[in-house]
Image: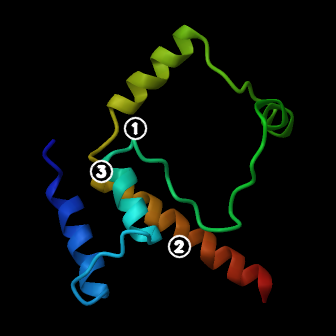
Amino acid sequence: RTLHQELVARLERVAQQHDGVVPLHGRLFSQWMHFAYPRECSYPHAAGTTKLMSSKEWSQATGMKSSLGREELERYVEQLRSLDEPADSWQQQQRHEQQQHEQQHEQQQ
């Protein structure tokens, strides 16, 4: 598989932050792996930002179904196909996490 140039550049920046070495057990590398291989590697959420729920608990909490029918799944897959490159997803997730961090910081003050 050929990786998008921006993803490779991101990994190089991680290495620059750590004296030329990428910490393989760090969260940044896990994030990079997710955006490079989204089907194979789950997203590493920051500690304390997620809560494990059963599908029934999630449905009760959100009021949404925890599974999709065939037609719904096909529509969802089509939407995913129209997304930008993985590098764009990486940037969007980084911005989202930064906003969450800032909001948590503001609430603590």
Task: List x then y, in percent, for residue 79.
Answer: 41, 28
Of helix, strand and loop, which one carries label 3? helix
Give the residue number, with chain letter if any, for mark 1: 39
Q: In the image, is residue 9 above or below residue 71?
A: below
Splitting the image into 4 quarters, where does residue 58 fall? Answer: top right
Instruction: State how far apart marks 1 and 2 are (Cα).
Output: 24 Å
> At 21% from the left edge and 84% from the top edge, which residue is drawn?
20
Residue type marked 2: Gln
Instruction: State how far apart marks 1 and 3 are (Cα).
Output: 9 Å
Query: Which numbered disc flags the more N-terminal residue, 1 or 2?
Result: 1
Q: Nearer the viewer, residue 46 or 79?
A: 46
Splitting the image into 4 quarters, where does residue 56 fall? Answer: top right
Give the residue number, with chain letter if any, for mark 3: 36
> At 62% from the left edge and 78% from the top edge, which residue is drawn?
102
- Taking the view exactly as shown, the residue that stands out farthest to the front is 25
- Whether pointer 2 and pointer 3 mark residues with C-beta atoms closer than 8 Å, the reply is no
Task: List x then y, in percent, for residue 81.
Answer: 33, 29
Give the residue number, with chain letter if any, for mark 2: 98
Q: Quadrant of the C terminus?
A: bottom right
Q: In the image, is residue 103 above or below residue 77?
A: below
- Whether pointer 1 and pointer 2 mark residues with C-beta atoms closer than 8 Å, the reply is no
Determine whether, in the image, residue 73 is placed left or right of residue 21. Answer: right
Query: Which numbered disc flags the more N-terminal residue, 2 or 3?
Result: 3
Of helix, strand and loop, which one carries label 2? helix
Task: List x then y, in percent, for residue 36.
Answer: 30, 50
